[in-house]
Image (cartoon, rainbow, N blue to C red):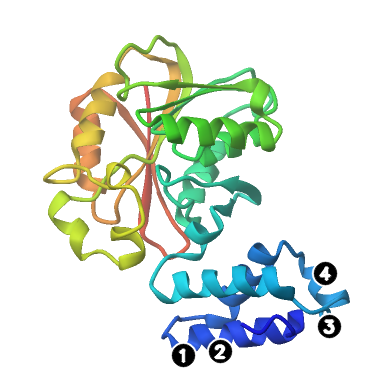
Amino acid sequence: MDENLSRRAALRAAAAHLAAAGIADAEREARFLALGVLGLTARDLALDGARAVGAAGAAALSAALARRAAGEPVARILSAWEFWGLPFRLAPETLVPRPDTETLVEAALGLVPDRDAPLSVLDLGVGSGCILVALLSELPAARGLGLDRSEGALRTARANARANGVGERARFAAGDWCDALRGPFDLAVSNPPYIASAVIPGLDRAVAEHDPAAALDGGPDGLDAYRRILAGLTGLIAPGGLVLLEIGYDQAGAVGDLARTAGWTGRGLFRDLAGRDRVLAFSA
């Protein structure tokens, strides 16, 4: 990348580079990378796009393009992504927030009878904190607890809660699913690992090589985490309280059976924007 290129020309060069590397939607990804790496806004690009990127900017953008061409996702390169219209920092121990998971937030909000109530919210496997932070941003009187086994994830979630203005209403703790938890909680949510172990090596490279294995691997049949969660939450949810779980596209029947065996009452199946089964809801 030539340091004398203007910002607009650098963006065009970046898109061409990614397209030549076989990256789908190269223009969009180049724009994300250029803005993120150069620390620009869309307004900066529009109003001051003729300014040269400079030596430091050219070097940083070249390095980012090389990483993307090698298969690393944009979100991993930038260590940041957006979810529910909110900005989130990422860490190696956290998943990249995905639009499909917004179905979980939307479903939970739709089932909560009073958004202004002082609810107690539990997020199992909190990761970056995107689900818990999104919920607290929409439930102004709620307080939340995010649980994760990874200290790196907990640090990231705590920072994201503060950055998005809900830090005073969110607590984070290290734990193994529901072990040692004390309730009651009005709402429990989770996007647990649900991919069968043998399937993981065949996933898209962006997932298999860059997402944390602990956040993907659901055991031999992909259901290990659901067994732990559905059994462990018994007695921790307030009467009439809700449990919402993200699921794989083909897991509604199996997870529903586990829930019924554990004594939970079904409250609905929710599909993502592509029409795939994505979230199951239950009540105590």
Mark positioned earlier in the residue sequence (4 or 3):
4
Q: Residue at x 28, y 47 (%)?
A: 213
From where the camera sits, is residue 111 visible? Answer: no
Instruction: Please state which amino acid type lies under the numbered disc 3.
Output: Ala
Element type where label 1 sits in the image: helix
x, y percent for residue 11:
67, 81
Q: Which mark is residue 44?
A: 4
Q: Residue at x 20, y 33 (%)?
A: 258
Q: Earlier in the sequence, mark 2 or mark 4?
A: 2
Q: Amino acid at mark 4?
A: Asp
Residue 177 is left or right of residue 14, and the answer is: left
Q: CA distance from mark 4 to mark 1?
A: 27 Å
CB atoms of marks 4 and 1 within 8 Å: no
Front one among 162 and 12: 12
Residue 179 is situated, as x and y percent measured from the top left of the image, at 29, 16
For residue 268, above or below residue 70: above
Q: Earlier in the sequence, mark 3 or mark 1?
A: 1
Q: Nearer the viewer, mark 4 or mark 3?
A: 3
Residue 179 appears left or right of 169: left
The answer to which of 97 and 67 lies nearer the viewer is 67
The answer to whether mark 2 and mark 1 are in CB contact below 8 A is yes
The Cα–Cα distance between marks 2 and 4, rounded to whole angstroms, is: 21 Å
C-alpha span from label 3 to label 1: 25 Å
100 shown above or below 224:
below
Element on which disc 3 rests: loop
Residue 121's place in the image compared with 272, above or below, is above
Amino acid on which the number 2 mark rests in the picture: Ala
Q: Indicate the amino acid at tag 1.
A: Ala
Disc marking residue 20:
1
Q: Which disc number belongs to residue 16?
A: 2
